[in-house]
Amino acid sequence: MLSVKQNEPLEFTEEMLGKFAEIVTRYPEGRQKSALLPILHEVQAKYGWLSAPAMDRVAAYLQLEAIEVYEVATFYTMYFLQPQGKYALEVCRTGPCCLVGAERIMKHIEERLGVKEGEVTPDGLFSWRGVECLAACGYGPVLQIGPEYTFYENLTEAGVDKLIDELKEKASANGQSPIANG
């Protein structure tokens, strides 16, 4: 998933370009900018994140200024602007969740995984970050895991540990080795 390095030139495959063309046909003539979000999703699904060269290529494909793509990619938190782990843990950090322990959960995740916010574990399995409201204020602290965006409520440190262990087991069953510092 971490196949594109920062500032590495890249070319989209014929298969990707075909998918982009299909997406563009969903919108009226001259409105190709409307295809920007779904095309960014396709690029992120392929590479795991949106590098500057990837966004530049999307801009060229859609005949947009690069800044138009950057504005969209930096606005929506579902787009990753740096490499992420296979499992991207996102903890709500807004007021209601912080009142019931979100900051404690984030500190626990940092200690358990051995990486700071925005970093990726050495094996590429995990990254984590605080995000804005996940719309479950009455069930905090809450966390979602991308790229599938499964959702977990009423988190405790023990619950986070169980979740991380389950994800390690899932990755191990699929042939990826779990991290050593668990």
Image (cartoon, rainbow, N blue to C red):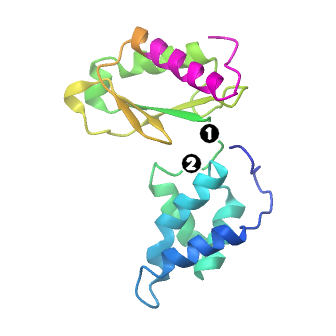
Disc 1 marks which amino acid? Gln
Label 2: few (<14), some (14–19) or many (≥20) C-alpha neighbours in 10 Å = some
What amino acid type is highlighted by mark number 2? Phe
- Characterize the magenta stretch by its predominant secondary structure: helix
- Specify the segment rendered in magenta: 160-182
- Quadrant of the rendering where the C terminus is positioned: top right
Determine which of the numbered discs, if any, sits on residue 84 in the image.
Answer: 1
Looking at the rendered structure, the secondary structure element under dot 1 is loop
Asked if the residue under mark 1 is in contact with the one under mark 2, i.e. CB atoms within 8 Å, the reply is yes
Residue 80, labelled with which disc? 2
Residue located farthest toward the left when viewing the structure as drawn: 138
Please name the residue shown 42% across and 40% down the image: 149
- Give me the residue at 47% from left, 82% from top: 25
76 drawn magenta: no
Q: Quadrant of the N terminus?
A: top right
Q: Residue 41 location in percent, x, y?
A: 52, 58
Dot 2 lies on which element?
loop
Residue at 72%, 67% in the rendered image: 13
